[in-house]
Image (cartoon, rainbow, N blue to C red):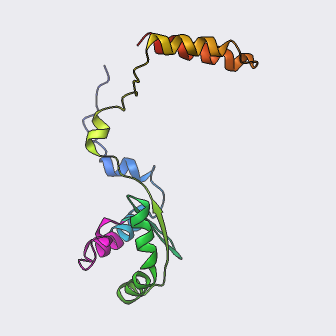
Amino acid sequence: MMKRSKNKKPVPLSQLFKRILPEGFAQKRAEIEQFQHFFDLQESDAVFQMVKVTNVTGQYLNVTLPNAALSSYLRLHSDQIRQLILENFGVDLILKISTRPEVSEREKQYPKHKLSADFSQSSCDQMTTAAEYIEDEELKQAMKSLSKTLSKK
């Protein structure tokens, strides 16, 4: 067992991460949070509050929304948003809007279940018989394997 020197103090966790995180990380994080706060405060439109700011660069403000319809809606209002950002922050940024579906807590907890279809033994036998007439050997074997797998359920 290693003995700790009495003179050495434990290194704070923040110091450990300074070596790992890129230079300017704290500033970038603060900038992203500032724009996120801006969208959160836009009570005039509920869609604006669903925006997640993912990155800010010199020219671009990258944001995501949980579905394509909301992303399209935001694109329709991108000129209005750019104007609000210019008024509030003094920068003219191009909006990059993407869709990133959010996974619900329920989906995270329970893995997706395989769909189980109910196939009769007769259907499986017909599939095996049909497979015999397929010329492509790989496809023939795949059909037979599928038939065998479905008949076990």
Question: Residue 138 at x, y = what percent?
Answer: 70, 18
Q: Residue furthest right?
A: 135
Q: Nearer the viewer, residue 55 or 67?
A: 67
Does 41 lie within the magenta span?
yes
Q: In the rendered image, which quarter contains the N terminus? A: top left
Residue in the image at 43% along x and 55% along y: 100
Q: Which span of residues is magenta-colored?
A: 34-51
Q: Nearer the viewer, residue 85 or 73?
A: 73
Residue 85 versus residue 115 in the image, above or below: below
Residue in the image at 56% along x and 14% along y: 126
Q: Nearer the viewer, residue 115 or 117?
A: 117
Residue 12 in the figure: left or right of residue 16: left
Residue in the image at 50% along x and 71% along y: 57
Residue 132 in the figure: left or right of residue 20: right
Question: Residue 106 at x, y = what percent?
Answer: 26, 40
Q: In the rendered image, which quarter contains the C terminus? A: top left
Residue in the image at 28% along x and 76% along y: 45
